[in-house]
């Protein structure tokens, strides 16, 4: 057979193939010695071919005892995913059956509690990630579909596991054995207490009829949330615009999108690299309106608004069965806040303090809009529209404070930002990162990078993380961290960052807006939280912290992106190599909190919206959701909601673990301001002693004990909102 019938390997695939051959992981396939691959040995590093022998070898490498790679044996076909998922589900059920078979008087830590802390259950089992994670990023639609199906089955299995009264009885029996519990470590004691509470919050004290109904409701909610997420991830909306409709976006932006789908037209998706620049710098109001309409208007993201209505109704029923007046109360009762009332008081207090300043901020933008409309010959409509806020906020920074986002962007090439960010985190937290060479590990896309993390002083390996930074079809559309694997006895954690940052072109490297830099710095802080946490349990909140605190560490670290010494390190002009000029740098810092009251009101609105739809009387349908948005948005944000638009269609937080918890961003922001001002601002942003205390006192404890106690120890006093109010100019020194 002629070699011309074989598919040539791309350079990355060929290098990986060569490395695997040299390592003895595969033998040279017939017809493959000239850099081609026969039909049974094709590779998908570039996302176009079927799995090959070398890819199989790399995907299986974790099972060979090689601890330098993440402990995930990656699955490459829908069939493999389906078969592995079924085995995990079977093993999980068998594990629970084994616990349930122990006579109550014979329960021990080893035969009961330890079996709940380790595989096969959930996130201490690396193969759970291998089965379900690729739904968010695989280049193969069939793999994404299979991974999504596996995720739904796992979600249902977790619900069923929490409803095992026979297992709960044994956990409860052990927890009542004071002598045995006294022999445990603090973390083990915490796990016993938390596991018992989780079973009880799942309604195991309920009559069987109610318990069965609860199981059904939880499974239905998981399915609704999964479909909502799928609608977001699979969206392929495209707006075809004339270059003139993108005035202000810059030649490079237009050139990268011109004639992709239609000659003479620019293709605009609803991914962040498209919509953020348009929202901030496109001078054509109608274009900004079209993008807003495409994301929030009727028909956007299929039936997502109906799914939200279904979800809030299901959660209300779940809360009622469990004896709570609302889903919001059910959630808040186990958060740092302690109750829905405490959160409402927190939000109302902030809103009262911010509203007058917010009105002033809005009026400044209105004046700016009036002048701009006159300048471009457009009639001024006398109001600030939803699609105007980002544009005129950005214009204010540029015209009054000299902050030119596009000019500043030239100083933040992605590669430099990434490498410098990693360097800063290593110095600050006493860690060492080692990037794995391409071709030594399997990844779902050629652009994915993988790093090993260890403690610098002890050399102990803590785990690994992946970086997948650029948008592509079928990939998760926002920025998020996925905690793929949690620490276990002989296993490090594995985290992954999925972002949608602009990719480089042949003419120019990827250049980031400063807001992108802040986002990357923030998200990477979540990776550090996952890797530095020292707990080893299956339950998410056991190995981490309460949901309303989880954003605080990353929000605090955003402050680094506003420090002169750090900005000088993070910036490097893509052509000259120079750091950000002092004039630009000072103008950015000076303008940091411009419009902060107006922006904070939006966060209060989102938090209030979340609590309202998860409150005592959740809306029954999309029309009810629309009425709430139409009422709350102008009341709190001071900006009308465009007719028919509803951001709940794309507000993914409320259809995952952030339901009734979005307030945590504001709650955590107050705490983050306190941590930064009290320790790092006073003692040095790169002070390694403070950094290590932060790592050990705040990140390492995870969800054990009371997070307020951890913060009090780190701060030297109980947390306060004073630093937040002062830093935002709301409270004078």
Image: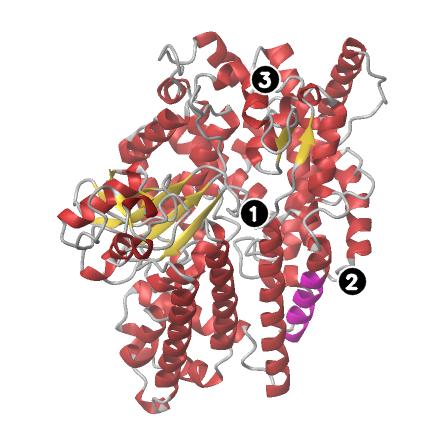
Q: Position of residue 629 (x, y in %)?
A: 77, 46
Q: Nearer the viewer, residue 119 or 475?
A: 475
Please rate how many residues cluster around mark 1, counting C-alpha atoms within 10 Å: few if below 14, some from 14 to 19, many from 20: many
Whichever of labels 3 and 1 marks the residue nearer the N terminus, that label is 3
Q: Nearer the viewer, residue 144 or 488?
A: 144
- In the picture shown, does residue 693 fall above or below 137? above
320 in the magenta segment: yes
**Whole-number angstrom distance, CA of label 3 to CA of label 1:** 36 Å
Q: Which image quadrant for residue 452?
A: top left
Q: Which residue is mark 3?
A: 250
Magenta extent: 310-321
* Residue drawn at point x = 54 percent, y = 17 percent: 406
**Whole-number angstrom distance, CA of label 2 to CA of label 1:** 25 Å
Q: Nearer the viewer, residue 90 or 140?
A: 140
**Whole-number angstrom distance, CA of label 2 to CA of label 3:** 45 Å
Q: Position of residue 364 (x, y in %)?
A: 73, 18
Q: Nearer the viewer, mark 2 or mark 3?
A: 3
Q: Nearer the viewer, mark 3 or mark 1?
A: 3
Residue 679 relative to residue 13: left or right:
right
Classify mark 1: helix, strand or loop: helix
Q: Which residue is mark 2?
A: 620
Classify mark 2: helix, strand or loop: loop
Q: Is residue 309 visible?
A: yes
Q: Position of residue 448 (x, y in %)?
A: 36, 42
Q: Nearer the viewer, mark 2 or mark 1?
A: 2
| Residue 724, numbered label | none
Q: Is residue 176 visible?
A: no
| Residue 664, numbered label | 1
């Amino acid at each position: 057979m002629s070699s011309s019938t074989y598919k040539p390997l791309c350079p990355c695939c060929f290098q990986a193939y060569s490395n695997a051959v040299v390592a003895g992981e595969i033998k040279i396939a017939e017809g493959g010695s000239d850099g081609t691959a026969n039909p049974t040995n094709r590779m998908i590093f570039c996302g176009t071919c079927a799995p090959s022998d070398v890819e199989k070898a790399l995907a299986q490498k974790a099972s060979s005892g090689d601890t330098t790679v993440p402990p995930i044996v990656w699955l490459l076909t829908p069939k493999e995913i389906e078969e592995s998922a079924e085995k995990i589900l079977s093993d999980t059920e068998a594990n629970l059956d084994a616990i349930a078979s122990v006579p109550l008087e014979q329960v021990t830590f080893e035969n009961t509690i330890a079996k709940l802390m380790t595989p096969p259950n959930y996130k201490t089992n690396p193969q759970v990630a291998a089965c379900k994670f690729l739904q968010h990023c695989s280049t193969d639609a069939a793999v994404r579909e299979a991974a999504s199906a596996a995720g739904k089955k796992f979600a249902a299995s977790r619900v069923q596991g929490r409803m095992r009264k026979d297992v709960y009885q044994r956990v409860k029996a052990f927890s009542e054995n004071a002598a045995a519990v006294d022999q445990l470590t603090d973390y083990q004691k915490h796990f016993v207490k938390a596991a018992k509470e989780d079973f009880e919050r799942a309604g195991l004290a309920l009559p069987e009829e109610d318990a069965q109904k609860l199981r059904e409701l939880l499974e239905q909610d998981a399915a609704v949330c999964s479909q909502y997420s799928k609608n977001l991830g699979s969206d392929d909306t495209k707006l075809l615009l004339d270059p003139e409709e993108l005035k202000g976006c810059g030649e490079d932006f237009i050139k990268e999108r011109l004639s992709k789908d239609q000659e003479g037209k620019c293709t605009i998706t609803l991914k962040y690299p498209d919509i953020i620049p348009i929202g901030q710098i496109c001078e054509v109001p109608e274009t900004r309106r079209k993008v807003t309409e495409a994301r929030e208007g009727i028909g956007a993201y299929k039936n997502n608004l109906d799914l939200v209505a279904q979800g809030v109704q299901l959660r209300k029923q779940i809360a009622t069965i469990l004896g709570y007046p609302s889903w919001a109360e059910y959630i808040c009762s186990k958060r740092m806040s302690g109750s829905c009332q405490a959160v409402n008081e927190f939000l109302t207090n902030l809103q009262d303090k911010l509203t007058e300043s917010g009105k002033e901020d809005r009026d400044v933008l209105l004046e700016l809009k009036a002048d701009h409309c006159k300048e471009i010959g457009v009639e001024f409509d006398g109001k600030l529209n939803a699609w105007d806020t980002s544009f005129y906020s950005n214009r204010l920074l540029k015209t009054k404070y000299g902050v030119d986002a596009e000019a500043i962007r030239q100083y933040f090439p992605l590669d430099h930002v990434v490498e410098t960010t990693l360097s800063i985190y290593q110095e600050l937290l006493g860690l060492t990162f080692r990037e794995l060479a391409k071709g030594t590990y399997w990844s779902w896309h050629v652009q994915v990078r993988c790093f090993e993390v260890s403690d610098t002083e002890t050399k102990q390996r803590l785990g690994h993380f992946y970086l997948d930074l650029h948008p592509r079809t079928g990939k998760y559309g926002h920025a998020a961290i996925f905690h793929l694997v949690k620490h276990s006895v002989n296993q490090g954690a594995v985290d992954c960052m999925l972002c949608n940052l602009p990719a480089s072109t042949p003419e120019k490297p990827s250049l980031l807006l400063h807001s992108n830099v802040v986002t990357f710095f923030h998200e990477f802080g979540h990776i550090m939280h996952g890797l530095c946490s020292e707990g080893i349990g299956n339950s998410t909140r056991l190995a981490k912290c309460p949901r309303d605190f989880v954003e605080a560490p990353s929000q605090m670290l955003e402050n680094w992106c506003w420090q002169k010494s750090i900005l000088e390190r993070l910036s490097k002009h893509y052509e000259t190599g120079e750091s950000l000029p002092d004039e630009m740098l000072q103008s950015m810092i000076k303008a940091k909190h411009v419009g902060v009251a107006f922006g904070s009101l939006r966060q209060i609105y989102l938090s209030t919206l979340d609590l309202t739809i998860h409150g005592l009387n959740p809306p029954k349908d999309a029309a009810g959701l629309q009425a709430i948005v139409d009422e709350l948005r102008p009341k709190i944000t001071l900006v009308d909601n465009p007719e028919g638009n509803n951001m709940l269609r794309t507000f993914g937080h409320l259809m995952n673990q952030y339901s009734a918890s979005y307030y945590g961003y504001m709650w955590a922001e107050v705490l983050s301001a306190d941590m930064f001002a009290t320790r790092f601002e006073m003692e040095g942003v790169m002070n390694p002693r403070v950094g290590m205390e932060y790592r050990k006192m705040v990140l390492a404890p995870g969800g054990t004990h009371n997070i307020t106690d951890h913060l009090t120890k780190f701060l030297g006093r109980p947390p306060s909102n004073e630093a937040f109010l002062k830093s935002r100019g709301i409270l004078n020194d």
